[in-house]
Image (cartoon, helix red, strand yellow):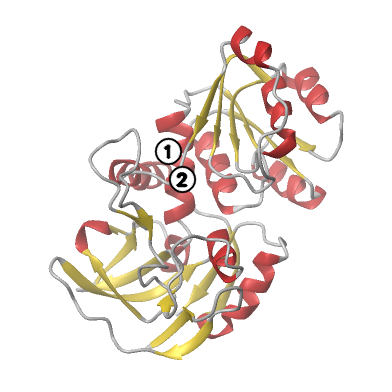
Amino acid sequence: MRAIVINQEASMPEHVDKKMPELQEGQVMLNIRASSMNHRDVWITKGLYPGIVSGATMGSDGCGTWQGEDYVINPGLDWGLNQNFQDSRFRVLGVPDDGTFADYIAIDKKYLYLKPSHLTVTQAAALPLAGVTAYRALFSRAGLRQGEKVLVTGIGGGVALMAFQFALALGCTVVVTSGDAAKITKAMKMGAVGGYDYKDTNWTKDLVTDFGGVDVVIDGACGPGFSGLIRVCQPGGRIAFYGATAGQIGSVNPQQVFWKQLSILGSTMGSESDFGQMIDFVSKHHIVPVIDCVLPLDNYRDGFSRMAEGKQFGKIVFSH
């Protein structure tokens, strides 16, 4: 079968002809029909991700067919029993475990969820990792409530867009940031009421002037700009962050945090419960993931290049 594997650290993956996987107890053979990229795929090729195994098939997200039904895969393996945090065995599908950038995958049936009926296979392949990460950050961690004001930073990425769509579906007022004016314009057309260039030193002051601040912030960057997120929070605000692409959190004024009774919450992926609730939420509200482009699996290098350059608005999907 076709497979896209990582053979050397700090190098592009390779297209190989790989043996069909062998089924273990509890596993089924899923015929992958579409898969999608995440930033972790690029980080793996740069050697910036732990647990890299030579010869492992890449890819965390996928939708495929088993016994005539289409399923999406929960890419969070072995979360454990505690809903508050993941078990030490927890890992993300696709390196070190063989992932979805292949024609077939052997996967425990407990990680398969029926594809929401309103989604195509291609759309469903864009949902899993970004969807569960956004859902947990918004609801399980930040406790988002209907009608609240939400800031989603770095709009254009998969998790940011899912968080944006989930908050809109709940009836929240949503504002966004980006360093790309075109991405802000696209978000405004999708329902954002405000958009700010995070490279503008006055953006936090402008947001507070325009909207009086926000109740919830969903962030994937951290870095020196984190103090600005604290400034735009209203009293009782919650900041949930799921990544740190801009590096370590810079100088923070603790008085602003304790006086405004703010909560700063780390969040990673999600449990099986989070994933199931996310699928139900998507089905109930007929949410369709934003897709940047669809490429044949054989053209995977184009997808890696596009993501590495940060050009995408939405998910990069491979058709199998």
Contact flag, marks 2 and 1 (Cβ < 8 Å) = yes
Q: In which quarter of the image is the C terminus?
A: bottom left
* Mark 2 Cα-neighbour bin, 10 Å: few <14, some 14–19, many ≥20: many
Residue 268 image position (x, y, % from top left): 45, 43
Furthest residue in direction right, as rendered: 201
Q: Which residue is nearer to you in this view: 289 or 46? A: 46
Seen at 70% across and 18% down, the residue is 253
Residue 144 image position (x, y, % from top left): 48, 26
Furthest residue in direction bottom, as rendered: 17
| Above/below status of 244 relative to 104 | above
Give the total of numbered labels: 2
Which image quadrant for residue 239? top right
| Above/below status of 289 relative to 46 | above
Amino acid type at circle 2 is Thr
| Residue at mark 1 | 136
Q: Distance between the residues labelled 2 and 1?
A: 5 Å
| Residue at mark 2 | 133
Residue 59 image position (x, y, % from top left): 45, 69
